[in-house]
Image (cartoon, rainbow, N blue to C red):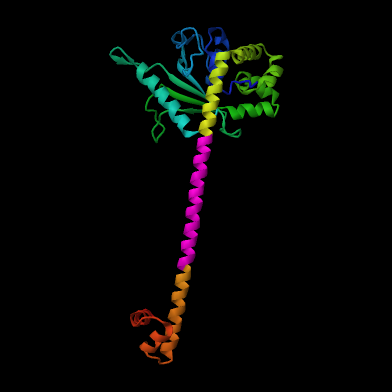
Amino acid sequence: MKWYSGKYDRAFKEVMLKENNKDILKALLEKILNVTIDELQILNVENLLGNVHVKSQRLDLNLKTNVGRINVEVNSTNYEYVKVRNLAYLFDIYSHSTLVGEEYDINTKYIQINLSYKLGKNNDPIDIYEIKNNKGKNLVDNFFVYVVNMDYYMNLWYTKNKREIDNNLVIVMLGLEKEELLNLSRKDGMVLKYMEELNKVNEEPEFREYMSLEEDQRKIYNTFRKERDDAFKERDDAFKLLDESLKEKNETIKKAKKEKETIVKNMLDSNMSIEDISKITELSIDEVNQIINGI
């Protein structure tokens, strides 16, 4: 039976949205943002009516902390549309939260944290994006996107970099599979708690039903995309063959024309009349004259 790790956005949020797991979430945020969080409130728990397994409902990890408003997303792919979708969501939070009464809130920070895979293990561990002009001046001072390169942190695990693993444990554990988590949990209580909570989520029928449907939709989409890409490739290959055929045909025509020009020139050099040249070459007199004028 498939076991869903924290690489899956839904599985990650099923764990982190629970009030009794705020200690794990707090440790993760503090590590990524390099801050101390004294207050942490999960804003959307009350909207779930006590059940985070509402079918087809998007789970959003929206937080209110003493260091600002925070939204967390897990991205298993690096598609451009994912970046646009996540940014649009943060803009929506920003636009609905900055107006307070008759004034705009310019002090509260709005932060989106993207735990992103498929970025490449050799790239920077964390990139911080702000809205700046071409001279590096901020347009606003309270809007940030943190992109966490999960490939970088997973590489720490696979290369057995013990010191760095211990230093980044709360990030590394998010990408580990069941057996890997089990091994790591024997050395750390927080990892043990995270693994146990993730196991509980994986055992819940509603969660598995949701993930099965989501995976099925993803497979259907991937199949459709492959069929579409294959069709485009077949079309491009056909156009390429046609272009090569037309190029070859044009070269043949140019070669035949050149040969006719050479024959006509040789006949003219032999003082043959245009009429005789026309009869021998089976060209019309007009065609012969065009060749002569072009020589």
Q: Residue at x 50, y 36 (%)?
A: 224
Image quarter hosting the N terminus: top right
**Residue bounds of the magenta highlight:** 223-250
Q: Quadrant of residue 158?
A: top right
Q: Residue at x 39, y 81 (%)?
A: 283
Q: Quadrant of residue 192?
A: top right
Along the line of sight, the residue nearer the viewer: 188 or 92: 92
Along the line of sight, the residue nearer the viewer: 112 or 143: 112
Image quarter hosting the C terminus: bottom left
Say if the magenta span includes residue 247.
Answer: yes
Residue 96 location (% of width, % of height): 35, 18
Q: Measured along the vertical axis of the image, is residue 267 above or below residue 140?
A: below
Look at the image and tell me whether residue 33 can be seen.
yes
Look at the image and tell me whether residue 77 can be seen.
no
Secondary structure that dominates the magenta span: helix
Q: How many marks?
A: 0
Residue 276 location (% of width, % of height): 39, 89
108 to the left or right of 51: left
140 to the left or right of 209: left
Residue 235 location (% of width, % of height): 48, 49
Say if the magenta span includes residue 249.
Answer: yes
Q: Residue at x 70, y 23 (%)?
A: 162
Q: Residue at x 45, y 32 (%)?
A: 81
Residue 110 location (% of width, % of height): 43, 19
Most extreme residue toward the bottom is 271
Most extreme residue toward the left is 102
Along the line of sight, the residue nearer the viewer: 277 or 130: 277
Q: Measured along the vertical axis of the image, is residue 126 above or below residue 208?
A: below
